Image (cartoon, rainbow, N blue to C red):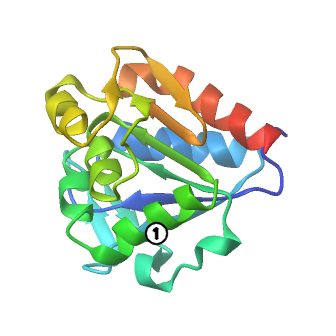
Amino acid sequence: MEAKGKRVLILAEELYNEYELWYPYYRLKEAGAEVTLVGSGSSETYKSKHGLPVTVDTRADEVDPAQYDGVVIPGGYAPDLMRRYPAMVGLVRSLFEAGKLVAAICHAGWMLASAKIVDGKTLTSFFAIKDDLIHAGARWVDQEVVVDGNLITSRTPDDLPAFMRAVIQWLSTH
């Protein structure tokens, strides 16, 4: 099991992309990781863009980042809502600054920009937020997955296999 003993957070908020939350959730569990679903605190259950519910395990303001090995941030429109909660943004920044995994797909780059962790980093995202990331100081590239230190990014659900291979590989070596 490539991630046995690792503890990983997955963030959730209204209008999350169901593929980008559930595929990492089950892939991480399959790899042996302990996965904790984290919400902003605005609800205990959030609905995806298509209405699929997810019930979270805890709120961002209750999480001790020192107890975790990383975070996966799904896209959809949820990141635009997530970044309105200082505890969620702070959690991402804390994990990044501690050298732990921060993995973001699609629109999740908004959270990276709000956490102020993209300046000088090479990353990718859904093309529509390219300008936001460049204005935050990132070097944006159009690739299915980009690994820059402890930051892993991908563009769309089609990139999930490459994204999760990179996430599992990172966890297995750190």
The residue at the point 28 percent across, 78 percent down is 43
Question: In the rendered view, would you say 106 is above or below 7?
Answer: above
Nearest the viewer among 116 and 159 is 116
The residue at the point 26 percent across, 40 percent down is 107
Q: Please give the count of numbered marks on the rendered protein.
A: 1
Q: Residue 108 sits in which quadrant?
A: top left
User: What residue is shown with label 1?
Assistant: 91
Residue that protrudes farthest toward the bottom in the picture: 62
The residue at the point 24 percent across, 43 percent down is 136
Q: Residue 8 sits in which quadrant?
A: bottom right
- Direction from residue 151 to residue 56 in the image, left or right: left
The residue at the point 61 percent across, 55 percent down is 70
| Whole-percent x, y for residue 133 in the image | 24, 37
Residue type, label 1: Leu
Q: In the picture, which quadrant includes the N terminus? A: top right
- Direction from residue 52 to residue 152 in the image, left or right: right
| Whole-percent x, y for residue 144 in the image | 43, 17
| Whole-percent x, y for residue 2 in the image | 81, 38
Q: Residue 3 sits in which quadrant?
A: top right
Decide if residue 39 is in sight here.
no
- Direction from residue 119 to residue 97 in the image, left or right: right
Q: In the picture, which quadrant includes the C terminus? A: top right
Nearest the viewer among 125 and 19 is 125
| Whole-percent x, y for residue 125 in the image | 31, 29
> Which element is circle 1 on?
helix
**Category of crowding for the residue at label 1, using alpha-carbon neighbours closer than 10 angstroms: few (below 14), some (14–19), many (at least 20):** some
Decide if residue 174 is in sight here.
yes
